[in-house]
Image: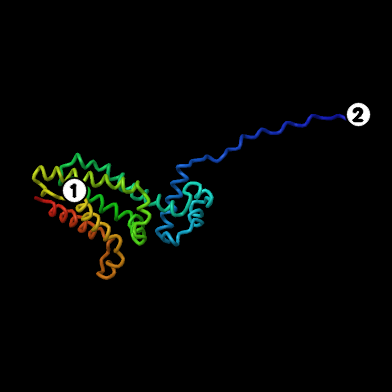
Amino acid sequence: MTITTAPSAAPETSPRRGRKNNPEKTRENILQAAISEFVQQGLAGARVDAIAERTQTSKRMIYYYFNSKEELYVEVLEKLYGDIRSTESNLHLAELEPRTGIRRLVEFTFDHHDRNVDFVRIVCNENMHHGEYVKQSSAIRSMNKTVLQALDEILRRGATEGLFRKGLEALDVHLLISSFCFYRVSNRHTFGEIFQVDFEDQAVKARHKEMICESVLRYLQA
């Protein structure tokens, strides 16, 4: 007589965990990797394969989010300009005495450029393209109006209170502030080598920051 036994029950297994899909995080990771690639290689030399490798994703995924390398580059520009403009909005310049507001804006611009070399390099690269890709972004033009509006408000208040001279153009003052802060980063290697200046030296930074603050305030004063 043959005795048959029922097959033993299979051991219970926990359900397999699927990979959590976080589109916003994936998109942000791609943008961060693209910044590094565009800074190092420029738009022409940048490779989508390299960006995919940096993010451990695929070219197909990158094209899913951004369609093309050029569109990704435009979004990198929008992100970098957006970062500085959104941080500027947290300065609450309208709540400050005009001279204090100008000083805070100058110090912020100085520190932002000094700490965000990638922003300066990408802007230099875009100027080599004659602003071709900035032209494609209405968002960049729109977000950059905010700093002019905030600056214009400070200048008007300062003029009303007799602190600043009348007829100042916000765009001109913005250019004055940006030019010094940008140049000392964009040309730090050539200028630093020719004149043997260490732009990373904290004493040099402090001296330059105070110099641009004083220069701007003296230009504005009534």
Q: Is 16 on the left or on the right of 169, as rendered?
A: right
State the residue in front, 47 or 117.
47
Q: Is 167 on the left or on the right of 104, as rendered?
A: left
Element marked by disc 2 = loop
Residue at screen point 18% across, 50% down:
169
Residue at screen point 45% across, 62% down:
45
Q: Earlier in the sequence, mark 2 or mark 1?
A: 2
Q: Give percent across and percent down for residue 152.
A: 19, 45
Quadrant in which the N terminus is drawn: top right
**Amino acid type of the residue that numbered disc 1 sits on in the rendered structure:** Ile
Against 196, residue 216 (above or below) is above
Q: Are marks 2 and 1 in contact (CB under 8 Å)?
A: no
Q: Give percent across and percent down for residue 124.
A: 33, 60
Against 155, residue 204 (above or below) is below
State the residue in front, 159 or 14.
159
For the view shown, which residue lies furthest in the right direction? 1
Marks 2 and 1, Cα distance to the nearest angstrom?
A: 100 Å
- Residue 102 marker: 1
Residue at screen point 8% across, 50% down:
222
Element marked by disc 1 = helix
Residue at screen point 21% across, 58% down:
208
- Residue 1 marker: 2
For the view shown, which residue lies furthest in the bottom direction? 194
Pointer 2: residues within 10 angstroms few (<14), some, or many (20+)? few
Pointer 1: residues within 10 angstroms few (<14), some, or many (20+)? many
State the residue in front, 167 or 51.
167
